[in-house]
Amino acid sequence: MGSEAPSWADQWSTGGMDDGYGRGSSTNSKENKTANLKAATAARLGKAKSAAVAGAHHAKTAAKAGAQKVKSGTSTGISWIKKQYHKRSSK
C-alpha cells in the first residue's frame, strides 16, 4: 500500500503530484512569471539607462557651454576694468 501511492508529504511538498488544481505545476508557473518579469524589468532598465546616459551627455554639454561663457565673460570684464583703470590713472 505504501509503495503504490506517494506519501502525503510527497504530494504536498514543492514539486509534488499535479492534482489538476495547479498545485504541482505552481513552481514552474512562478518561475516563468519571475523570468518574464525579470526580462521586462531588464528591458525597461536598459531604456532608462540609455535615457540617463543621453541626459548626462546633454547636461555635460550644457555645463561646458556655460563654463565657457563664464570664462569669456570674466575675461572680458577684467579687460574692461583694466581699461577703465588705465584711463583714470593716465589723466
Image: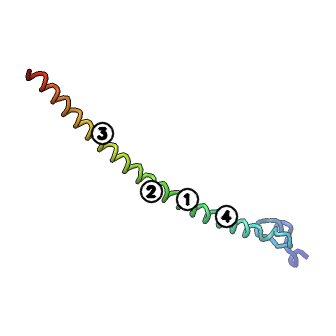
Residue 54 picture quarter: bottom left
State how far apart marks 1 and 4 are (Cα): 16 Å
- Furthest residue in direction bottom, as rendered: 4
Q: Secondary structure at mark 2?
A: helix
Quadrant of image for the N terminus: bottom right
Q: Which residue is mark 3?
A: 70
Task: Give the Cα separation between the discs numbered 1 and 2.
Answer: 14 Å
Q: Does dot 4 land on a helix, a strand or a loop?
A: helix
Nearer to us: label 4 or label 2: 2
Amino acid marked by disc 2: Ala
Mark 3 → mark 1, Cα distance in angstroms: 36 Å
Q: Amino acid at mark 4?
A: Thr
Query: Mark 2 = which residue?
Result: 54
Residue for badge 1: 45
Q: Identify which residue is drawn at 21% across, 32% down.
A: 78
Identify the residue under disc 4: 34
As shown in the figure, which amino acid type bears the numbered disc 1? Leu
Q: Position of residue 30 (x, y in %)?
A: 72, 65
Q: Secondary structure at mark 3?
A: helix
Asked where in the image residue 74 lies, by quadrant, the reply is top left
Q: Position of residue 12 (x, y in %)?
A: 83, 66
